[in-house]
Image: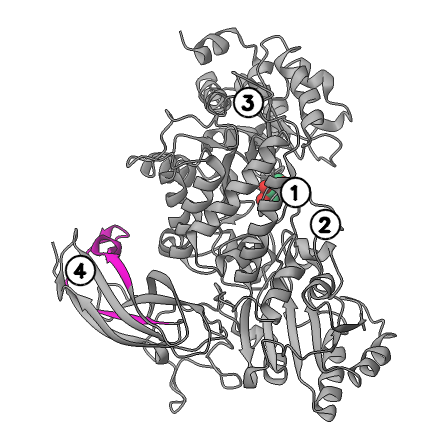
Amino acid sequence: MSRIDLLLGQMTLTEKLGQLTMTAEGAAVTGPVSAAADLSEEIRRGAVGSMLNLYGAEHVRQRQRLAAEQSRLRIPLLVGLDILHGHRTLFPMPLAEACLFDPHAWELTAREAAREAARDGVAMTFAPMLDVSRDPRWGRGVEGPGEDPLVAMRFARAKVRGFQGTDQGTEQGTDQGTDLSGADTIGAVAKHLCGYGAVTAGREYASVDISERTLLEVHLPAFAAAVQAGVVAIMPAFIDLAGVPMTANASLLRGRLRGRLGFEGTIISDYNSIGELVQHGVAADLSEAAALALQAGVDIDMMAGAYLHGLPAALQRGAVGMELIDAAVRRVLRLKERLGLFEDPYRHCRSPEEPAALAHRRRLARQVASRAIVMLTNRADTLPLSPATRRLAVLGPLADASGEMRGPWWSAAGEQDCVTVLAGLRTALPGAQLLHVRGVPIEGTDDAGLAAALEVCGGADAILLCLGEAALMSGEAASRARLDLPGEQRRFAEAVLGRARALGKRVIVVLFAGRPLVVPWLAEQADALLAAWFLGSEAGNAVADVLIGRTSPSGRTAVTWARDAGQVPIYYAQRRGGRPADANDHYSSRYIDVPVQPLFPFGHGLGYARFTLSELQVSPAAVRPGDDIEARVTVVNEGARTAQETVFLFTHDRLASVARPTLELQDWARIELRAGERGTVVLRVAAEQLRFLGADLEPVFEAGELEILVGPCADRTRLLAASVRLIGS
Ligand code: NOJ
């Protein structure tokens, strides 16, 4: 008999429901489970199977001992934590990392995050967050890979592999046979299934009402990729999809995820989201809510206490059967088994690492952070800073703000653990005098520092303005209706820009934010504008590396930048429509007051070199499903220094049974070239990838002409074009 059968045979109902219950200590909870401040007794009696928001080797060891040594069946606890972009060492926030367009780097940072977390008692991270986001009002875009489904799919695979150690997947889907008990691995939880990024009007937790096609084509593929990569768990989103809360969405969880995608792992609810089924208005009480969630396929109840307290009554009235509970318990025990917890419940509680390992991680953090920076503008080669810079004004509320550099999730990283821009510049420019004035706070009306900031401009060779959002102005529960700089920052920046203009000095702006802020005025007036998102532990060093030219910026924006909040949702993969935008045609798809074009297209990003692309060759001329398309393009570095270029391949199916977007990303590649060097970038598209959902929402491969568009970003005017013929099967 297997361990799981043996255990299941001995478990009381409370012990079973305990395995399905995840709670936290000392948290404000709505459910009754952790109403008790100290959970020791609950754990000992088997009423708690998993915990969240717990870390620290000794702390976890203490909790684990109660379960693994003092509970009747000695089933170890599962400890989960949100490790979005690092644990003690923070890498850039996921949206910033997405701008690297580098799956290898995405995997490496997850690997290192897992290493740190795994020593600190953590067995599972609630990551990767895979929500495609096309609306910058929504705060959570910063936690995910941006607007594009292909980027999200590659991000999903890389992150799952990084956290879980290796590629655990098989062709069929999750491989429940492989184990994850390697010393430095943790389980990954792909979240939030599905469509959360499309909340109505960008308002957090609001209802989502999108077509099934968009759900399947845009929001679901990343989850399918995570399943294929062997992700051990999935978290449904808080939201309802056209009235069906995801936590109770049997057709998506049981039907689509388990049925069609073959997911055999564990489904973990979001925080109290089973309890919130009552608030949604689909369950009368906690017991009904629990029954709905269990029927839909949710195995673990995070923080609602609904399973522990609601399922006994549901069982009694016949709303659920014991077989559903048993199946969920099996999946939870199987997860614990795969994570190696039965063999060694303390395997995640180890001594701190050697300083050498930490130093290696900091180096990686710095490298990735500098590559995540997107140089949006750079007039007259304002950047890199001249080596002759002797006096630099470093102004603005984000110049010396360590805590903010962490972004909206920081796991175990402390407020003072991140290098600020000011500190980074002090190290990078030891001979220069840095004239630092905060000027104004991030939010609020206090402008007492404005005069002092203007004052120092006079004596400076150049002016650096560090502006943007506070860390918690993005992330969960941080939707914004206004997408400009908060507080008095715009007034402050305009005053500094005006003074600089009068003095004939250049102004470089570094923008920290969890979203593409809508700042056309700034893009227009600043001499150089860098998007630095939230870069984590090494933020200041990374910014300094780019400013002084130690690194040529190579980040490319993974989201389209709006020029006006009225343009959102905005993304490159739009359909043409029957009356495509035409500046000369009044009756075309556009605004009468704002251009339709974004401020910066998806993929935009400058560097210190200049590249030209030419000689696009695509072969073969005709393909069938099963064939591969290969595109080759010549890239020449016409600049004066080594730099990296990213080349994107889009397709456009001009004539299909269902209208296709005018651009769809199919592949990308990066190339590094020395000054004057010429190279060839090869991009590949499997013809299979060109299947799309027909009118019946089933995949079809349609014969016809397909445009292949290759270039540096999603601006059609900058793409080289060729075509291939698709031959139907
Ligand atoms: C709520 C968030 O939506 C989710 O992403 C997170 O994993 C949980 N809280 C746990 O912190």
Between 715 and 15, the one lying in front of the other is: 715
Q: Which mark is residue 269?
A: none
Q: Earlier in the sequence, mark 2 or mark 4?
A: 2
Return the residue at label 4. Answer: 702
Which tag is nearer the camera, tag 2 or tag 4?
2
> Which amino acid type is marked by label 4?
Glu
Neighbor class of circle 3 (other Cα within 10 Å; few <14, some 14-19, many 20+) is many
Which amino acid does the dot numbered 3 rest on?
Ala
CA–CA distance between discs 2 and 1? 9 Å
Image position, residue 470 (x, y; %): 71, 60
Q: Which residue is mark 3?
A: 314
Q: Is disc 2 in contact with disc 1, using a CB cutoff of under 8 Å?
A: yes
Viewer-nearest of discs 1 and 3: 1
**Residue 708 part of the magenta segment:** yes
User: Given contact means CB atoms under 8 Å apart, are the residues at marks 1 and 3 in contact?
Assistant: no
As drawn, 241 above or below 60: below
